[in-house]
Image: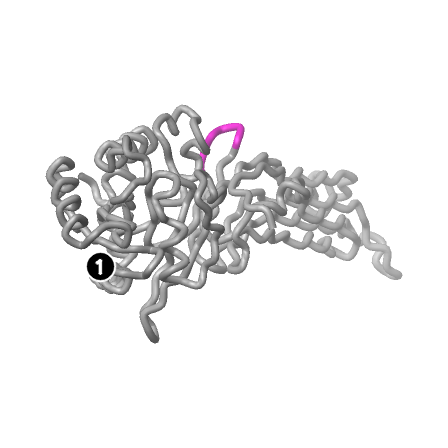
Amino acid sequence: MKFIDEAKLKVQAGNGGRGCVSFRREKFVPFGGPDGGDGGLGGSVYLKAVEGMNTLADFRISRTYKGQNGEPGSGNDCTGHGGDDLYVAVPVGTTVTEIDTGETLGDLTHEGETLLVAKGGKGGWGNTRFKSSTNRTPRKSGTGLPGEKRELMLELKLIADVGLLGLPNAGKSTLIRAVSAARPKVADYPFTTLHPNLGVVSLGPGRSFVMADIPGLIEGAAAGAGLGIRFLKHLQRTRVLLHLVDIAPLDPDADPVRDARTIVGELKKFSADLVAKERWLVLNKIDLVEPSEALKREKEIVRRLRWKGPVLRISGATGAGTAELKQAVMRYLEEHPRAAAAAAAAAPQ
């Protein structure tokens, strides 16, 4: 299925049913009075987060969702049947925004979570509601209120614990293949990865985390160069970023330090919060140079970047260093649970 992470749709809740005008007609009860019931409530429209969906492609086909109208009231003070609510399945991690106002209505981050996006209309009053001491035989009723109508923008942000950053061909897809069961395409040309990939990294019973691989960034991505920065939103929910740098680029004019600074510059243009996330420097492709040379290049890169965070050396192709990387990431995630991280982010500065 094609990966789609943005979609527009229209939702319309059901209208309330019309109230009833009716009078009791019974033998030996000449003045039975009004007994018209109210109309039923219109059905509301909800979005519901479900596991197993990882794209909004379905909303490119079906774009309008309507709740059921309420039934009209009837005699004998019978209220009309309410319309059935409509539940629309969306992927976990979907953010919902109303297009007309720009208001964010909700963020569905847990399986089974629901969000009311259009409320059903109230049913109209039956003529029983209009009787009074001065109006014993009211012959009017209320029309049901219309249900809410909204045009929504859905935006999918994948929920992953770890995100991979780097230039095209930095080895992100090779790494996620090496540490998980994900099988993204790997080739020796730029932009092999065209959409985000998720992989579950398992370290034994009860110990695993989700890793996200996004298309590589290049200089000018914020202005639309390459695949742009539209996929960076999929890293906003991660707890740690792994910044992959090619320690042995084939291009003799390539500069790993310049490349790393390019990525950081594009992050700043996209989101200050993303730059502030925990970020580790991962020097990839150490299998292409001698160990002594790899150590020398690592020291030079760290010195020029003035890097203060964790530094790891790996080879996604051979698997060297990947076991240590997985253990280090797992320890960090266990020490920084997602709930605690979210509370710290929400706390006033």
Q: Can residue 121 be seen in this view?
A: no
Residue 20 x/y as whole percent: 77, 46
Tell me: residue 111, above or below residue 5: below
Q: Nearer the viewer, residue 61 or 340?
A: 61
Say which of 104 and 299 sits in front. 299
- Residue 100 magenta-drawn? yes
* Image quadrant in which the C terminus is located: top left
**Which residue sits at x=86%, y=55%?**
25
Residue of label 1: 332
How many residues crowd mark 1 within 10 Å: few (<14), some (14–19), many (20+)?
few
Q: Position of residue 265 (x, y in %)?
A: 27, 30
Quarter of the image where one finds residue 4: top right
On screen, 269 above or below 324? above
Magenta segment's dominant SS is: loop
Residue in the picture at 47% in, 53% down: 184
At a point 39% along the width and 51% down the height, the residue shown is 212
Q: Is residue 298 visible?
A: yes
The three-letter code of the residue at mark 1 reads Tyr
